[in-house]
Amino acid sequence: MIDHLSRVDGTRVLADLHALRAIGAYKTGVHKPTFSEPHIRSLQWLEQRLPEAGLTGEIDGIGNVLGISTKPGPKLLAGSHLESQNYAGWLDGPLGVVYALEAARVINRDPNMNGAVEVASWCDEEAHFGHFLGSRSYVGGVTEADIDAARDRNSGKSMRDALREAGLAGRARARCERGRHIGYLEAHIEQGETLESSGLGIGIVTSIVGIWQYRIAFTGEQNHAGTTRMAIRRDAGLALARFCVDIDDRFPAACGPRTVWTTGRITLDPGAPSIIPGAAEMLFQIRDDDPAVIARLEDLLRSMAAEVDKQGRCSVAVERIRTGAPAMMDISFQEAIEQASATFAGGRSLRMPSGAGHDAQTLATVMPAGMLFVPSIGGISHHWTENTADADIVTGAEVFVEACRRLLAR
Amino acid sequence: MIDHLSRVDGTRVLADLHALRAIGAYKTGVHKPTFSEPHIRSLQWLEQRLPEAGLTGEIDGIGNVLGISTKPGPKLLAGSHLESQNYAGWLDGPLGVVYALEAARVINRDPNMNGAVEVASWCDEEAHFGHFLGSRSYVGGVTEADIDAARDRNSGKSMRDALREAGLAGRARARCERGRHIGYLEAHIEQGETLESSGLGIGIVTSIVGIWQYRIAFTGEQNHAGTTRMAIRRDAGLALARFCVDIDDRFPAACGPRTVWTTGRITLDPGAPSIIPGAAEMLFQIRDDDPAVIARLEDLLRSMAAEVDKQGRCSVAVERIRTGAPAMMDISFQEAIEQASATFAGGRSLRMPSGAGHDAQTLATVMPAGMLFVPSIGGISHHWTENTADADIVTGAEVFVEACRRLLAR
């Protein structure tokens, strides 16, 4: 009986994931924005599962779910999130929550296993209302004024209204109890193609990269697109295009091995077909886990801007609007995942940074934290076609639970 | 007495322009969108001036004003427009209307002068509701269904509602009577800096360039800006930026001496800071008066797109969405303006194409047409700081009236 309890049930893991996929289904993915009806139903689904894992808990005043154990011994916190990007994939978030739930089911009611796994679902990791509001609330980083100010990025609805409609207004927010947990473990789909293309089963996250974001604004001279000769134009849009190309040509020589950079938005002003843009703006982002690399790239960016200024045709202003804080994953957590991978994934694991942000980076500010990845088919993410092979999902669960066991047994 | 009548009154010309500037004033410019209250008041102002020029006429069913003469002999049609771009300059349009009015005042009531000048104000040259709706209505190019469909590009108000509110619903539209006019003459500010930078007073328009417009759409692969390595990205926004730079690098070797091209709008999809754009689109425009030049540039554009396709990272679709029709100005009109410039502007004139569109291009489809430009200070246009020196305005009026006289005397 104890033997039965102590084993990961792959069928149960897949069934749970499919149950969550059925709530707010969209094509083969889901559409569960934060505080939408399917999101709240998913949180309630988790709340109802907690007792079978020996946990008690409910949805708190910011939409987090915390399952608490009364079992003696060390406690490991584990989880992820249940809302989704709009019209996106079924595993981004739920995978880590279901793995945590499975670990709690396997470990918490087994008297022969040391300690307990406590399960968390962090609200709004997908940033419909802000940045990691749920996990930041848990570690004490969100004020009531922050909540007053937060609005849904699509609908503009205030977070207060959304909380009220979800029946969560007035509830207390769960807060981290310092010293309660030996650390935090989170599983997630990779969202890239590194594991798949290398034939590997488990990614051991070494760090979560920081995100540095810049508003780069070009000022030229707005003029008539028919009467202004090419030779005298001060076209801010063209200056912006040249700058984008210049970044792409010059960053590779200065970046780190896994640096990524992206121009996600471009706006020309006034944006009319017959007017030479007098102003233009780009949103530019760099991600790396090494602030020294970022410092080098930001220097390059500013010197490139100075070169444009010097040419005298258009002026450029580079404004950093987000400063990244890379989070290092705990070494002993990495080792526990690696040892678990040796047992359950034939050692097919790779240590790698996470290019995406995760709640683990917030938890890492108050306790040791670790993350493991399972492969994403085709590297696709934030799209309803996002998927992972069933066998990889089950292997990931086995590695995850074994890593929890090892961390609690230390 | 006759001598007095036959002379251009520069003070009167400036006073008329200032009277129109005072209607809908905005800073040192005006804000008179089509069918706005100040626009209608400007049309009424013109209507009231017609009798002093020996003309009768009223605002027609599309907002044109046509001043008709009963004087025997040849008739020359002259005019421009009275509405403005939003928050724009005071001379763009009114200059040509007031010159035409002055020519009619000088010529029509003088029994020693041959024929008459008829004055037109064409509605909506500034394209609030469509393309040259007023002048196109006059030459028979606008159906009732076109008017039914037209909407204000800013407010979305239907043209029918705007006409009703202006009290013009149900009025007949003036139509061109074939053979009535020996041609059409229009004066306008240059809107560029060619005349000013060359120290010249009069531009003799040889042609009005055609506008060819393209929607250039790039398709790559939308992906996560943190987890997708640079090496495997298919960034549609970056492909677009490279294309813009490529155009700027390669067009000069293939274009004509006065070709201009402009990327006026860029859109990245989805336009979020953390998502690699999977699609991107630019609105691109080329202007020239030589269709052979355009054909060469369009070939180049399509071959550049084919090169991008061949690289296999992103695909490009080039769609022509507007096909230009350059309008040639009548040679004898050019000669009349040149001779008039020799007399009244010390020969400081230049034959040049117009990079901007004007109602003269519509009139040129049914009668000989000519245009003259006066200098724009700093080449500025479509902005409330647009201006021309008083002396240049008066010289322009003298050249304009003399050109009318010469054309009627032939």
Image: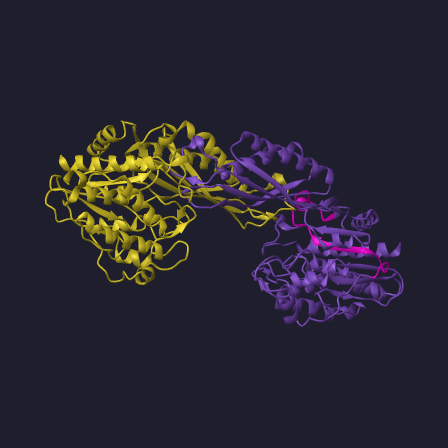
Chain colours: A yellow, B purple
**Residue B151 falls inside the magenta stretch:** no
Q: Is residue A322 left or right of residue B222?
A: left
Which residues make up the magenta segment?
B177-203
Which residue is drawn at the image coordinates 12% and 39% (left, top)?
A114
* Nearer the observer, A291 or A143: A143
**Residue B198 falls inside the magenta stretch:** yes
B41, above or below B327, in the image: below
Q: Is residue A29 visible?
A: yes
Specify the quadrant that holds the C terminus of chain B: bottom right
Which quarter of the figure has residue B164? bottom right
A383, above or below B252, in the image: below
Residue A347 point in image, percent of width and height:
27, 27
Q: Is residue A79 left or right of residue B11?
A: left
Residue A325 point in image, percent of width and height:
29, 40
Which residue is drawn at the image coordinates 23% and 45% (left, top)?
A101
* Nearer the observer, B19 or B168: B168
Q: Is residue B10 visible?
A: no
* Nearer the observer, B39 or B136: B136
Which residue is drawn at the image coordinates 32% and 35% (left, top)?
A392
Q: Residue furthest left?
A: A72
Which quarter of the figure has residue B11? bottom right
Q: Is residue B327 left or right of residue A404?
A: right
Residue A404 point in image, percent of width and height:
20, 38
Number of numbered discs visible in the structure rendering: 0
Specify the quadrant that holds the N terminus of chain B: bottom right
